[in-house]
Image (tube, helix red, strand yellow):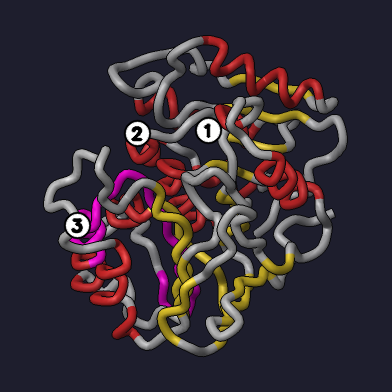
Amino acid sequence: MKGRLLPPGGTIGVPAPAYPYQQRSDIFRGKEWWEAKGYKVKLAEGIFQRTGYTAGTPEQRGHDITAMFADPEVDLVQTFDGGFGSAHAIPHIEFKVIEKNPKPFIGYSDITALHVSIAHYTGLVTFYGPLLTTMGHPKTKEFTYDRMMRALTHAGPLGVVPRNPDDDYIRPFNSGKVTAPLVGGCLWLLGQTIGTPWQIDARGKILFFEDVLAPPWYVDGLLTQMVQAGIFDGVAGIVIGEMARCDWNANAEHDWPGLASTEDAFDLHLAPLGVPTIYGLPLGHGDYLATIPLGVEATLDADNRTLTIDEPALEA
């Protein structure tokens, strides 16, 4: 199931399913970025709420996500921020409403919980890409804006996912080429789906993941659990995005400095699977973020070190 292309002058609906704002300008900055491009922005009812370290109660956040899909004026649902808390809202989302009102949905990091649950209950193609807090941020690159707007407004397949402009090295772990649906998100959140009704299903699929501030022993632990839980059973291929600030350095506060790396964890758990695997595309928490659709056919070519989006993600 697919939403429609973001039309010129369309409306961006913004719920806050995870972290709350710290400064109101966190919200206004992103809103004004869209408005300067000729779009309209509709903020969810609970956008300014705070309940502990989340943007309101789970009920409020679930209601706001549902309301953005139900609102006929909204053309794109872009989440405000990641952080923590999206999974709280899942039991309070009316997935039948989303199923009846398909539209593009975009966010990353903690929003993985929503990507996975929405896919499970509705089959909607969603986008792993910028948050409202990304828009207008002084550190956001034109690359990130360009890839997002192409993903949301381009009628055809997105083609080859570009490499990091500052570091184009991609490491393959196994050879081979496979075409399959692309699924995934932030590694920590994928692990949190284990045992839930919406547990990530990677059988016959290309599984993508990335993470941030996750030291090697943490990544090792997550992959250990996922392998033992059968998450990688039958996986067609694996795409590892950026693991931003995950390896030890002199300024980090990680335990066991220098004893192992994230690549060591990949060698231990993923290389033995024997499926095409690549590492290093700008997908995640780094300086560059290439928006990708989840739920469409893609081709992973480990020999040429490419991921190609083969299927249009939105309808005209």
Question: What is the spatial separation of the Cα atoms under label 2 and label 1, in whole angstroms?
Answer: 13 Å
Q: Pinpoint residue 309: horizontal percent, then vertical percent.
A: 67, 68
Neighbourhood count class around disc 1 (C-alpha, 10 Å): few under 14, some 14–19, many 20 upward: many
Per the image, the residue denoted by label 3 is 258
Q: Quadrant of residue 191?
A: bottom left
- Percent position of residue 14, x then y: 60, 27
- Relative to residue 178, is residue 250 depicted above or below? above
Amino acid type, residue under disc 3 in the picture: Gly
Q: What amino acid is found at the position of numbered circle 2 in the picture?
A: Gly
Q: Of residues 158 and 267, which is closer to you in this image?
A: 267
Question: Which quarter of the rendered picture does the N terminus lie within?
Answer: bottom right
Position above or below: 313 against 234: above
- The residue indicated by pointer 2 is 85
Does residue 195 appear in the picture of this structure? Answer: no
**Considering only vertical position in the picture, is 221 above or below 227?**
above
Evaluate whether residue 22 shows in this view. yes
What residue appears at the point 54 percent right and 17 percent down from the top-left corner?
Answer: 26
Q: Is residue 138 magenta?
A: no
Q: Nearer the viewer, mark 2 or mark 1?
A: 2
Residue 99 or 210: which is nearer the viewer?
210
Magenta stretch?
202-223
Whether the residues at callouts 3 and 1 have beta carbons within 8 Å, the answer is: no
Give the Cα distance between marks 3 and 1: 42 Å
Which quadrant: the C terminus? bottom right
Q: Earlier in the sequence, mark 3 or mark 2?
A: 2
Residue beneath the point at 35% across and 23% down: 54
